[in-house]
Image: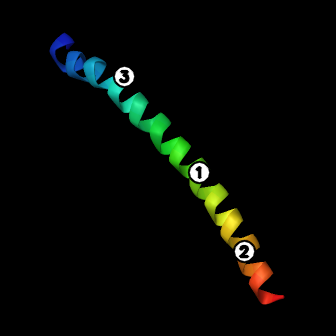
Amino acid sequence: MEFILTPIAFLAPIAFVFALAAISQVGSLKKDIAYLKSEIEKLKK
């Protein structure tokens, strides 16, 4: 059983870092979309 868990334990921190990076990317995308929406509203006027 230990043989199966060892690679997973090794990869867990890497997966965690990728998850944090993905979360921050989503946050910045939401900001970009909000900014673009406001720009579109300005153009409509």
Depth check: give the residue in front, 42 or 29: 42
Q: Residue at x 72, y 74 (%)?
A: 39
Q: Which residue is mark 1?
A: 28
Which numbered disc flags the more N-terminal residue, 2 or 1? 1
Task: Judge depth for marks 2 and 3 and give the one in front.
Answer: 2
- At label 3, the amino acid type is Pro
Classify residue 8 by image quadrant: top left
Mark 2 vs mark 1, foreground winner is 2
- Contact? badges 1 and 3 (CB < 8 Å): no
Compared across the picture, whether 5 is left or right of 38 comes to left
Type of amino acid at the residue the image marks with label 2: Glu
Q: Residues within 10 Å of mark 2 (few under 14, many from 20)?
A: few
Along the line of sight, the residue nearer the viewer: 44 or 9: 44
Reading the image, the residue beneath label 3 is 13
* Residue 5, quarter of the rendered image: top left
The secondary structure type at the circle numbered 3 is: helix
In space, the residues marked 2 and 3 are separated at their CA atoms by 39 Å
Q: Is residue 33 above or below residue 4?
A: below
Q: Nearer the viewer, mark 1 or mark 3?
A: 1
Query: Do the numbered discs 2 and 3 sit on residues whose CB atoms are within 8 Å?
Result: no
In which quadrant of the rendered image does the C terminus lie? bottom right
Q: Residue at x 55, y 51 (%)?
A: 26
- Measured as percent of width and height from the top left, residue 32 is found at 62, 61
For mark 2, what is the residue? 39
- Helix, strand or loop at mark 1: helix
39 or 34, which is in the foreground? 39
